[in-house]
Image (tube, helix red, strand yellow):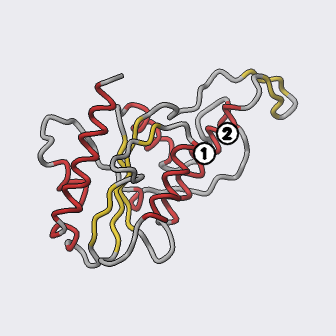
Amino acid sequence: MLTKEVLKPFNELNYEIVQLAKKELKFCNLCGKCEIIECPLEDDFNEVLEKMKEADGIIFCYPKYLFTAPTKLLSFLERLDLIHHFRKQKEVDYIEDLRVERTLPPPLEGKPCCLFVVSDPGESAEDCLGIVGKEVESLGMKLVSYDSQLGAHAKGKFRGEVLRDRKGIEDCGKLVKRLIETITRK
């Protein structure tokens, strides 16, 4: 809801909202095959990753749960991180006794992105922004921020309540403008 509301004034943008909550995402099994091919697990991960690779920029919008970000988002980021890690290693490797030269680059390196967090009123989102922010930076993505914050924060506890947080929506809109500026400066 927050992302749709924030993007309303940017009607010239072509975007797609992908909800990880509706996707089947398995846990990485550390097979290491992603260093030379797309992830071999049979789920929706490669579909989402392909959309992210095609995008000019990415917005991660997620709720702050009691202690952190949603585990599905963290699991997704972990799989991205493992692909990034495996593809950044030495140029030649041995997989199942075969000499393999890697040719695939890390998939999201240099991709600009920004973060929106929704939390209960009165709660800080800095810790939650920090966890996801560090993860996307470790992927080599360019984290776009403003006012020395890692992302924007909107408040809402119950469904739809975030749409009444005009300041949060405004802050997220400012962050989208910075993301667009970053993309157009490339």
Viewer-closest of 166 and 20 = 166
The amino acid type of the residue labelled 1 equals: Asp
Vertical relation: 123 (above or below) 57:
below
Q: Which residue is mark 1?
A: 81
Vertical relation: 126 (above or below) 45:
below
Residue located at (75% from left, 23% from top): 91
Label 2 environment density (alpha carbons within 10 Å; few <14, some 14–19, many ≥20): some
Query: Residue 96, position in %: x, y?
Result: 84, 34
User: If the image is split into quadrants, where does the N terminus sit?
Assistant: bottom left
Residue 120 relative to residue 20: left or right: left
Vertical relation: 128 (above or below) 59:
below
Query: Residue 78, position in %: x, y?
Result: 59, 52
Q: Quadrant of residue 170?
A: bottom left
Q: Which residue is mark 2?
A: 85
Viewer-closest of 160 and 131 = 131
Residue 174 relative to residue 85: left or right: left
Q: Quadrant of residue 87?
A: top right
